[in-house]
Amino acid sequence: MTQVNLLDLGIEELKKFLSSLDEPPYRAQQIIQWIHQRGVTDFDLMTNLSKSLRVKLAAHSTIEFPAISLERASQDGTYKWLLRLPDGNSIETVFIPERDRGTLCVSSQVGCGLNCSFCSTGKEGFNRNLSLGEIIGQVWIAARQLEKYGNAKVTNVVMMGMGEPLLNYDPVIGAMALMLDDLAYGLSKYRVTLSTSGVIPAMEKLKTDSPVALAVSLHAPTNELRNELVPLNKRYPLEQLMPVCKNFFPVGSKRVVTFEYVMLAGINDSEAQARQLVRILTFPCKVNLIPFNPFPNTQYTRSDDATIERFRQILLAAGINAWTRKTRGGDIDGACGQLAGEFKDKTGRNERWLKTGRLVPKSINSRRG
């Protein structure tokens, strides 16, 4: 029997694996608790498992995590880890401490299958999807590292790192189930958020498969502009996306979708565009305005604080709950849109971008809304 990495198994898969070893399925809960809640990876230390089971686990399975290649700490308390995968690729994971929470930004892909024009990850290209173990392994590593420092812990997880989570559906759903499991990380469904650029078929499936919170990367109030900023919009335009967002949570629920809107100077930040945004957000929701975080060779610049506040006030006046996100980790390239990792791009996108990435498309450069 080939050795199985137990980190790649959700609880149901682990039960099936134990059955193949002629062991009772209830042992899966004990193993999940040892690995994820207690951080134990040595089978000999799993003392409530029988000796015979521990011998079988050692013979037929492993517990393997990504390796920490680099850890960087920001002046504001943010941590970023560069994690090396068995195939030599690397991903990035970021922990952002706040006064009342500690948020871990988790990656779902090596690179990103999409090509949003304002995102560093997208410009790096794409290599592959992450396994369940490589996703949940980021949470395990962060929890263990933070335990060493003793002054912070993971209370929230956002699937907002490298990649589009809904293009790696099953491993992401399995990893989030472990995040919510009381025997693993025990996080509230309100404290685990999946962010998507708007993969509509997977969003419809997510409604029934996972109770987590949903954030949608919007970034533009019209199809014309969003086609350029978020090319996925050409496949799933706003007139299709907005009804799905409106109906994502059950009628009568107090839960609402959060829209993310990166503020790009002279591109999507005019008062006219704020009013356009009001016209398409006709249902209860939240809007996070995100000051753009620059990266090498980007053609974009950040909207100034006054412009962002004027934009926000227009949303507030229309009854839309709008916030400006505080930028964290910028000095270690750990802020929103800056994660890049180290990997071989299989798309050729990175090479093309390095040749042309400093050029601003005329249609964008001249638009003020």
Image: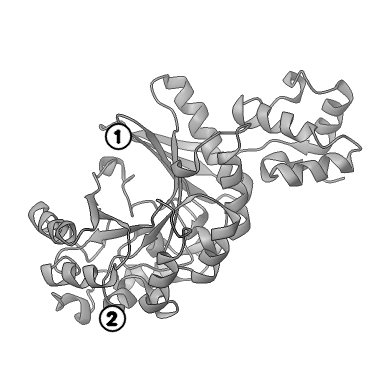
**Residue at x 41%, y 65% (from the top left corner):** 245
Secondary structure beneath label 1: loop
**Colouring mode (rainbow / by chain / secondary structure / one colour):** one colour
- In the rendered structure, the answer to whether residue 29 lies left or right of residue 37 reads right
* x 29%, y 29%: residue: 99
Residue 128 in view in this figure: no
Residue ranking furthest to the left:
306
Q: Is residue 292 above or below residue 179?
A: below
Q: Is 93 or 271 nearer to us in this picture?
A: 271
Type of residue at label 2?
Answer: Glu
The relative height of residue 101 versus residue 210 in the rendered view (above or below) is above
The quarter in which the C terminus is drawn is bottom left
Quadrant assignment for the N terminus: top right
How far apart marks 2 and 1 lie (CA) works out to: 37 Å
Please state which of residues 162 and 279 is positioned toward the viewer in this rendering.
279
- Asked which quadrant contains residue 353, the reply is bottom left
**Mark 2 lies on residue:** 224
Q: Position of residue 110 (x, y in %)?
A: 51, 56
Identify the mark nearer the N-term, 2 or 1. 1
Residue 74: which disc? 1
Front in this rendered view, residue 243 or 135: 243
Say which element carries label 2: helix
What is the x, y in percent for residue 156?
Answer: 43, 38
The nearer-to-camera label among 2 and 1 is: 2
> Looking at the image, can residue 100 be seen?
yes
Tell me which residue sits at (45%, 32%) in the image.
154
The circle drawn on residue 236 is: none
For badge 1, the amino acid type reads Ser
Residue 72, compared with residue 46, is above or below; it is below
Query: Label 2 neighbourhood size at 10 Å, few (<14), some (14-19), many (20+)?
Result: some
Whether residue 12 sits left or right of residue 270 in the image: it is: right
Residue 203: percent from left, percent from top: 51, 64
